[in-house]
Amino acid sequence: MAKVIQQDKSVQTLRGFAIILVVMGHVIGYKGDEGMKVADDSFWRWLYYSLEYFRMPLFTVISGWVYTLHPISKENINKFLDGKTRRLLVPLVAVGLIYFFIRLVAPGTNREVHLSDIWKIFVYQYDLYWYLPSLFWAFLLIAFVEYQSWMKKLSSWFLVLVITIIFLSLRNIYLTTVPNYLGLIGMFYLMPFFVIGIGIGRFPKLMTNKIFVNSMLFLFLAGIVVQQLAWFQLIDLPFHGKASPLGLLVGMTGTIVLFRVHLVIPSLVYIGGFSYAIYLFHVFGTAGSRIFLYKFGLIHPVVIFFVSLIVGIIVPIVMEMVIDRFKLTRFLFLGRKYAPKRKK
């Protein structure tokens, strides 16, 4: 029992680490005209690039691992799908609408939006919230695979992993210009990492094997070296980006190694407990603090980075504490059951 609790805390540590990486990425900005609006050759862009292969992969691997704690069966599949619909799609609509309207009226946002664009929340990937529908589709596909009992054995699990990588490769080749309609395109990117998470939870004998873990560590470090060589233009890679073969290599091997470390950091455990709320609401803290700092002439990038990062973590934690107290708000904005919060 103590070992299970310790393992859960180590995963919460990883969850806290992952969400901090997500917030850091959005503070810096995906492109030069977003977030801190940094130059493409700056230290900040290098930092963003260096962490790009970890952020959402680690988050998704954790989701796959958590799934193995309560996998679907023929008896609970409807309950499982109802829960994922509520947990992912309800906040997508509720929080997405609030985010849209705040951007519509707030001064100083990076990109202007128009009321006529509101329908895009439900059809296209919508900024940071692309992850929610894409993960929902991943859960649907996993539900089908699990219903057929196709990942009960190590060999069949590995086959499913290979298939997801093949489909992602086909997406990268043939669907590069197709928008992320309803999150379907993003699903292909998440699937290999979700399957890795299932493997970590379901086949601990392999995932803790010393030779296997050391091999993953070697591949991970080699991938990081190649990534840095590419950044400093010492080598030229034919494929770039988080969904590239290098991105997959670093993301998959790195998360396997991180799960093996079993590190427990109390502050990250605490933050990890609020990771979903931080994901949903951090943009209100990061953008708001950045606009506030700009207004008062505090434009030093180090100040903007750390203030936005801290506010982007604290504000969602406080918001969850308030939102979780009421049935309607906890349902709409956290995707939890429409019921009073259970007293501990």
Image (cartoon, grey):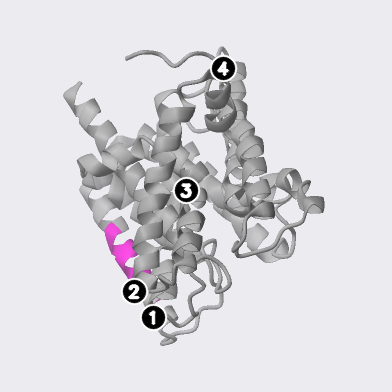
Query: SS of the residue at dot 2?
Result: helix
* Label 3 residue SS: helix
Q: Residue tagged by mark 2?
A: 225
Q: Earlier in the sequence, mark 3 or mark 1?
A: 1
Span shown in magenta: 217-226
Residue in the picture at 49% in, 37% down: 156
Can residue 196 be seen in the rendering of this structure? no
Task: Tell which circle, 2 or 3, labels the residue nearer the N-terminal end.
Answer: 2
**Disc 4 on helix, strand or loop?**
loop
Coordinates of residue 118 in the picture (x, y in percent): 76, 47
Q: Residues within 10 Å of mark 3 (few under 14, many from 20)?
A: many
Return the mark for residue 229. Answer: 1
Residue type, mark 3 in image:
His
Real-space CA distance between mark 1 and mark 2, rounded to the nearest whole angstrom: 6 Å
- Name the mark on residue 282: 3
Q: Position of residue 138 (x, y in %)?
A: 59, 39
First-in-chain label (4 vs 2): 2
- Position of residue 295 relative to residue 262, above or below, is below
